[in-house]
Image: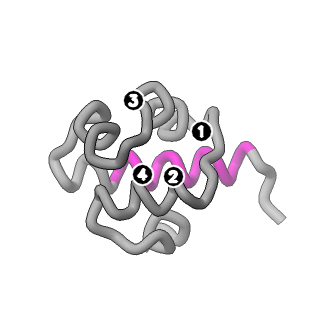
């Protein structure tokens, strides 16, 4: 099983990748998802976990399914 820090880092990298693909800034993703910009930044850097509600909100803002943020596809 992967270490929690590795999981957070991989998840954060995936969120950042999808955000950039959409041409969004962290502030734009935060506004579109209702998740604070500082939280978006901390998630992308692998410093903070998200609950399910926020994960779904980010996925919706990125026009993706929640699983897309988790599986790297």
The structure residue drawn at horizontal position 57% and vertical position 52%, both measured from the top left corner, is 10
How many C-alpha atoms fall within 10 Å of the one at disc 1: few (<14), some, or many (≥20)?
some
Query: Which of the two labelled residues, at mark 1 and mark 4, occupies the earlier sequence position?
Result: 4
Image quarter of residue 9: top right
How far across and down, in percent of the image, does residue 50 sit? Answer: 60, 48
Residue found at the far top of this picture: 38
**Mark linked to residue 54:** 2
Asked whether 65 or 70 is in front, the reply is: 65
Residue found at the far left of this picture: 23
Asked whether 58 or 46 is in front, the reply is: 58
Query: Which of the two labelled residues, at mark 1 and mark 3, occupies the earlier sequence position?
Result: 3
Q: Secondary structure at mark 2?
A: helix
Residue behind mark 1: 46
Contact, mark 2 vs mark 4 (Cβ under 8 Å):
no
Q: Give the spatial CA distance, label 2 vs label 1.
A: 15 Å
Query: Which of the two labelled residues, at mark 3 and mark 4, occupies the earlier sequence position?
Result: 4
Q: Is residue 30 left or right of residue 15?
A: left
The structure residue drawn at horizontal position 39% and vertical position 62%, both measured from the top left corner, is 59
**Mark linked to residue 37:** 3
**Magenta stretch, residue numbers:** 5-17
Q: Is residue 69 above or below residue 20?
A: below
How far across and down, in percent of the image, does residue 65 sit? Answer: 40, 74
Query: Which of the two labelled residues, at mark 2 and mark 4, occupies the earlier sequence position?
Result: 4
Contact, mark 2 vs mark 3 (Cβ under 8 Å):
no
Contact, mark 3 vs mark 4 (Cβ under 8 Å):
no
Q: Nearer the viewer, mark 3 or mark 4?
A: 3
Q: Is residue 32 left or right of residue 33?
A: left
Q: Is residue 43 left or right of residue 49?
A: left
**Is residue 27 part of the magenta span, yes or no?**
no
Predominant SS along the magenta part: helix
């Amino acid at each position: 099983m992967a270490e929690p820090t590795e999981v957070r880092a991989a998840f954060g990298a995936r969120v950042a990748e999808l955000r950039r693909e959409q041409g969004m800034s962290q502030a734009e993703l935060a506004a579109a998802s209702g998740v604070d910009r500082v939280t978006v930044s901390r998630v992308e850097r692998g410093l903070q976990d998200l609950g399910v509600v926020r994960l779904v909100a980010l996925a919706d803002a990125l026009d993706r399914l929640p699983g897309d943020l988790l599986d790297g596809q």
